[in-house]
Amino acid sequence: MGTWLSLFVVLVSIAALHRLVSAIQQHRKAKAHWTDGGFDARQLVFSEKLFRDASRGLVAKPDRGYGVGGVVTLVDLKTRSRHKVHRSDVVEISVQRVAVEADLGKQVSTIAYVVTETPDQTRKWHMVSLLSNDEVFAIKERRQRILDGRSIAHPTPRKGLCRHCAYQKECDDMERAQEAGC
């Protein structure tokens, strides 16, 4: 009986050690995914933190911010079917840049990275140039004018973008009104 018990204890210990080694390897692999862009984990300034530019009414929650030479560089993870950066990604990260700069009081780079991850879990790093503060504020102002009814939104010529848009009905109503001469 003692031999079987000893064998059982050894097998359970081996299984526990295997799980521990697997967990450590998974942690290292996940950490490596975020540092593939040349950033060291020690350079991480923040992760998924809320920032505000109260004077301009901007709120943002960037995925990651890395500090290199006193400048913060933003990194945003996007899960999608293919490795592609959209204009909306650049606008989103540009707003994040303005909010982080105002809230932290640190310089934030006008270059950022969008990391795309596809269903097969491959990741690709895309370097993007961010919009200027003036461009961010112009977009914010245009949005507000549209919401207040002081400006007319123009439907996109790329109808494929409309499929998942929350404002699709409003655009369809507006197109019908324009076609009717209203």
Image (cartoon, grey):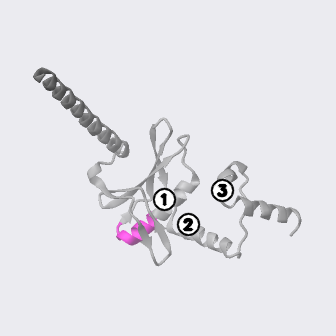
What's the residue at 78%, 64% (across, down)?
Answer: 174
Which of disc 3 and disc 2 is earlier in sequence? Answer: 2
Of labels 2 and 1, earlier in sequence is 1
Residue 93's label in the rendered image is 1
Query: Residue 84 location, x and y as percent?
Result: 55, 44
Q: CA distance from mark 3 to mark 1?
A: 20 Å
- Give the CA separation, mark 2 to mark 1: 13 Å
Instruction: Kindly give the residue lying farthest to the front in the view shown.
Output: 1
Crowding around mark 2 (Cα neighbors within 10 Å: few <14, some 14 to 19, many 20+) is: some
Q: Quadrant of residue 167?
A: bottom right
Circle 1 crowding by C-alpha within 10 Å: few under 14, some 14–19, many from 20 = many
Dot 3 alpha-carbon crowd within 10 angstroms: few under 14, some 14 to 19, many 20 or more: few
Q: Main secondary structure of the magenta part?
A: helix
Q: Which residue is mark 3?
A: 165
Residue 103 magenta-highlighted: yes
Type of amino acid under label 1 = Ile
Please state which of the two labelled residues, at mark 3 or mark 1, is closer to the viewer. 3
Query: x and y percent of residue 44 in the render?
Result: 31, 55
Residue bearing the label numbered 2: 135
Residue extent of the magenta highlight: 97-106
* Inter-mark Cα distance, 2 to 3: 23 Å
Q: Residue furthest right?
A: 180
Label 1 secondary element: helix
